[in-house]
Amino acid sequence: MKDEDRITSEEIAALIERTEARALKEGDVQIITAVIKKMVEIEHLYQEGKITSGRKLRRLIPIPRPKPSEENKSDE
């Protein structure tokens, strides 16, 4: 996965700030959903004993940037 296709830690920090301020912007819901799905995936793999090294965990951590949905495209 290319770096530009990943959600950065800075974007996550900004998302947290917007969430706390109750000021979400377009696309934030997709990012929140992607983060939660990734967390569930990692937890599931961990419980199954499939994460056996730090290397494997580091490969799982990057969160792909969600693609704009058809719904969002029609709003533009």
Image: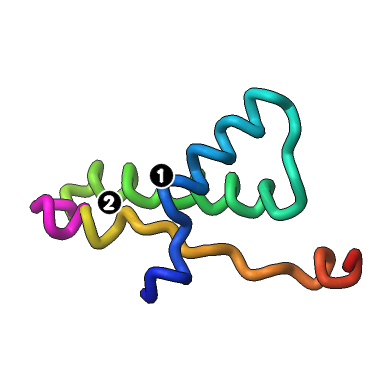
**Residue at image mark 2:** 45
Q: Is residue 24 left or right of residue 5?
A: right
Which percent across, then down, holds residue 1? 37, 74
Scheme by which the image is coloured: rainbow
Q: Which residues are magenta?
A: 51-57
Which percent across, then down, holds residue 46? 23, 45
Q: Is residue 73 left or right of residue 30?
A: right
Q: Amino acid at mark 1?
A: Met
* Label 1 Cα crowd, 10 Å radius (few <14 / some 14-19 / many 20+): some
Using the image as rendered, state which of residue 19 and residue 29 is in the foreground: 19
**Residue at image mark 1:** 39
Using the image as rendered, state which of residue 50 and residue 58 is in the foreground: 58
At x 90%, y 71%, the residue is: 74
Relative to 68, is 61 above or below? Answer: above
**Which quadrant, please, contains the C terminus?**
bottom right
Q: Amino acid at mark 2?
A: Leu
Query: Does the magenta-highlighted stretch encompass residue 71?
Result: no
Residue 32, picture quadrant: top right
At x 47%, y 70%, the residue is: 5
